[in-house]
Image (cartoon, rainbow, N blue to C red):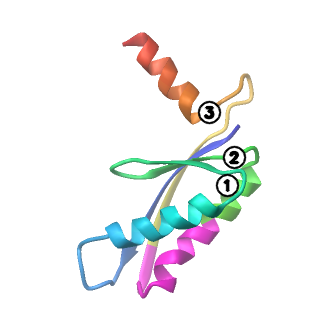
Amino acid sequence: MPIMQISVIPLGTGSPSVSKYVADIIKVLKKEEGIKCELTAMSTIIESNSLDRLFEVAKRIHRVPFDNGALRVLTLINIDDRRDKELSIKGKLKSVRKKL
């Protein structure tokens, strides 16, 4: 399962706070079928059965700040797509915790 780390950063909003925009993005993600998401302090992690689906969702959430008045949006994406074994958000965390 591919996993995407995504940060959607609204610019030109007149305020340094972005929490309203992040909340709106999470609301959109929660409505997406076949998507698991985890909010972190610096980004959001999303998981799906399909890389194409992740890109589709990334495009959708990239638009959210524009829909809410942002004049510019910077979106950063990292993808972890492993082919030798099953990959999941929970599995990655479990692997690290096991080693702690």
Q: Residue at x 45, y 20 (%)?
A: 96
Res 56 quadrant in image = bottom right
Labels 2 & 1 near each other (Cβ < 8 A): yes
Which residue corresponds to the image point at 49% horizontal and 67% vertical from the top-left?
A: 25
Asked which secondary structure carries label 2, the reply is: loop
Of residues 74 and 93, which is closer to you in this image?
A: 93
Q: Residue furthest top?
A: 99
Mark before the other along the chain sequence, 2 or 1: 2
| Magenta portion: prevailing SS class | helix
- Of the numbered discs 3 and 1, the one sitting upstream in the chain is 1
- Tag 1: amino acid: Leu
Residue type of the residue flagged with mark 2: Ser
Q: Label 2, label 1: how many angstroms apart (C-alpha)?
A: 6 Å
Q: Is residue 80 above or below residue 31?
A: above
Q: Is residue 93 rendered magenta in the image?
A: no
Q: Which residues are magenta?
A: 59-73
| Percent coordinates x, y for residue 35 in the rendering | 66, 51
Q: Quadrant of residue 17?
A: bottom left
Query: Is 100 left or right of 49, judged from the image as shown?
Result: left
* Numbered disc 3: secondary structure: loop
Q: Reading the chain from its start, which is encountered first: label 2 or label 3?
A: 2
**Image position, residue 24 (x, y; %):** 46, 70
38 vs 88: above or below: below
Q: Could you say which disc has been placed on residue 48 in the image?
A: 2
Q: Which residue is mark 1?
A: 54
| Residue that mark 3 sits on | 88
Residue at the image point whose x is 35% and y is 78% from the top: 11
The image shows residue 4 at horizontal and vertical percentages of 58, 48
